[in-house]
Amino acid sequence: MKISTLKLAGALVVLVGLYFVIDMFGGKSKSKGVKSELVSLQLDKVDFLSVKSPQNEVELTKSDDSWSLKLPNGKIVRAEEAAVLRSIEALKNVKPSRLASKKKAKWSEYQVDSAGTRVIVKEEGKNALDLIIGKFSMVGQRSFQSFVRLYEDEATYVVRDFMSFSVPSDPNSYRFKTITDFLNKDSINTVKFNYQGDSSFVVEKLKGEWYSAGQVLDSVKIGNYLNNITRLSSSKFYDEELLAINPVSKIEFIGSDGSLISSLSSFNQDSLNIVISSINSDSQFNDESVYDKSFISLSELQ
């Protein structure tokens, strides 16, 4: 018995309709909770970032286009904007490769429970992301992956080529580390070395030559000194409260117009030489290399 073309067409329409009904309702029920996108951030609107791991915790806040960092001791210091933006950009690249598990029982295996790193991002004061970054593992020899979970969800996802190290929880990773930054060292005309006792001295540039108390200095040595201190930075912070009010030593860098460009102050505490810069005054540095490069004697320039 032959089936008419009209009946075949009708059957095909019914089958296609059933397919779309199953795909729309049955398919969704099977993949309930599975997300194709986990992170959607607008960089220019982000004004808060919190990263908390079992070892460390950082809290960063943006105000008037600058970022500040709250240290574990409660002190607020300047943050390095580029470091904050790197973390936010890394989060924007968190894209799920596949679903690892929909079960809460698997959280500990993938370290997306209290063993993971919790990241909270706010945009204009409103929560934009609450993410747990968990276990990291290699895939072959050249690729890697991390397991992540949205804090309010039970599902755990695999994200290829992403690691929690991209969003560090160590406060020092975000701190403003600059001590000196002379855009043009030739703009320095006078350097005043204010030391205790009678060891203070001043060096001054006159008609291309450097002098101290009328004595010509070695141009190579002072050139090397200026090169060494043009851009100083350090991650060796000293966050204890300074007991002394007045510095033991101070260096002032003065421009050709007589204005103060910047200064470095040294305090002695716990047998350490603690350095504070005028361009990063809320941070204290315990770095002997920085101290030795900056606080030199007159004999080293003669």
Image: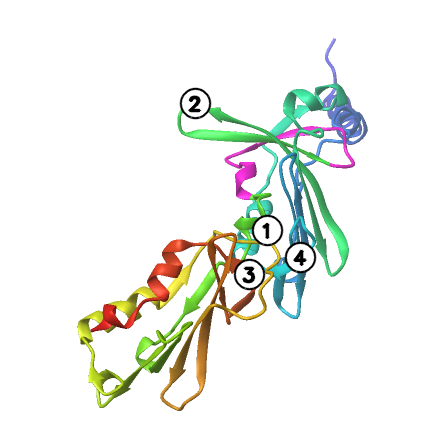
| Callout 1: SS | helix
Marks 4 and 3, how far apart at CA: 10 Å
Question: Is residue 136 visible in the rendered structure shown here?
Answer: yes
Q: CA distance from mark 3 to mark 2?
A: 43 Å
Of residues 223 and 118, the one drawn nearer to the viewer in this rendering: 223
- The residue beneath circle 2 is 140
Q: Position of residue 10 (x, y in %)?
A: 78, 26
Residue denoted by label 1: 88
First in sequence, mark 4 or 2: give its number.
4
Which of the two labelled residues, at mark 4 and mark 3, occupies the earlier sequence position? 4
Q: Is residue 298 magenta?
A: no
Q: Rate crowding at label 1 as few (under 14), some (14 to 19) or many (20 or more) other CA atoms within 10 Å.
A: some
| Figure quadrant of the N terminus | top right
Q: Earlier in the sequence, mark 3 or mark 2?
A: 2
Please tell me which residue lies in front, 6 or 162.
Answer: 162
The quadrant holding residue 155 is top right
Give the residue type at disc 4.
Lys
Q: How many marks?
A: 4
| Rendered residue at 66%/62% (across/down) | 62
Front tag of 3 and 2 = 3
Instruction: Select label 1 or label 2 by which is in front.
Output: 1
- Disc marking residue 75: 4
Give the extent of the magenta segment. 151-166
Q: Secondary structure at mark 4?
A: loop
